[in-house]
Amino acid sequence: MTPVAKLYGDSLYELAAEEKKEAVILEQIDAVKELLHQNPDYLRLLSMPSIPKAERCSLIDEAFRDQVEGYLLNFLKILCENGTLSELSGCARQVRNRYNSDNGIIEATATAAISLSDAQKAALQKRLETITGQKICLECKVDPAVLGGIRLDMEGTRLDGTVENRMAALKKEIAEIVL
């Protein structure tokens, strides 16, 4: 994350916190980010220096006026005016980081060879919450390369109980054997 995204994201979060609208702003900024990600041509249009800033801000106003909180709408216009709309993803990430920190939430990603059932997801989330003593926001991914088991990424730590990892360790051990 760039220093600009961190600064802008912190500013938006602090404003949202003052108004007790952190969850709403978080949900809306994620939706706007996803919408712009799905429409890269619109993002390019909003970032074109050849189009006057007032026109670009007017396009943002027309597109989002009744869809998002006024604070977020003004935030998007500020990003547009300053030529930093490309930092929106980083800003959204910083807003989420601050929200998670303030609400005792840890993000975790579980990767398995096949999709986990709802019961497995719930059991894993409950177990992680018991271990950490915090609320866990669990994202589950499927990667057939892991072959079996689960790889868990949480707060910069990776716990790898996959068959893929075990086979790599075994291959390394075999390579180190001197005959």
Image (cartoon, grey):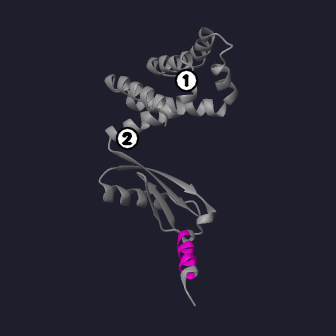
| The quarter of the displayed image where residue 60 is located | top right
The quarter in which the C terminus is drawn is bottom right
89 to 78, vertically: above or below? below
In the displayed structure image, the side of residue 111 where residue 95 appears, left or right: left
Q: Distance from label 1 to label 2 (Cα)? A: 24 Å
Residue 43: % across, % down: 64, 25
Of mark 1 and mark 2, the one earlier in the sequence is 1
Residue 170: % across, % down: 54, 78
Q: Which residue was labeled with disc 1?
A: 84
Residue 32 visible here: no
Residue 80 visible here: yes
Say which of 78 and 74 sits in front: 78
158 to 84, vertically: above or below? below
Q: Is residue 85 magenta?
A: no
Q: Main secondary structure of the magenta part?
A: helix
Residue sticking out furthest to the bottom: 179
In the displayed structure image, the side of residue 47 where residue 103 appears, left or right: left
* Range of residues picked out in magenta: 165-174
- Three-letter residue code for mark 1: Thr
Say which of 159 and 117 sits in front: 159
Q: Which residue was labeled with disc 2?
A: 100
Name the residue: 34% across, 22% down: 19
Q: Residues within 10 Å of mark 2 (few under 14, many from 20)?
A: some
- Three-letter residue code for mark 2: Asn
Q: Is residue 169 magenta?
A: yes
Q: Considering the numbered disc 1 on the image, is that residue within a helix, a strand or a loop?
A: loop
In the displayed structure image, the side of residue 41 where residue 78 appears, left or right: left
Residue sticking out furthest to the front: 178
Residue 168: % across, % down: 57, 72
Frontmost of labels 1 and 2 is 1
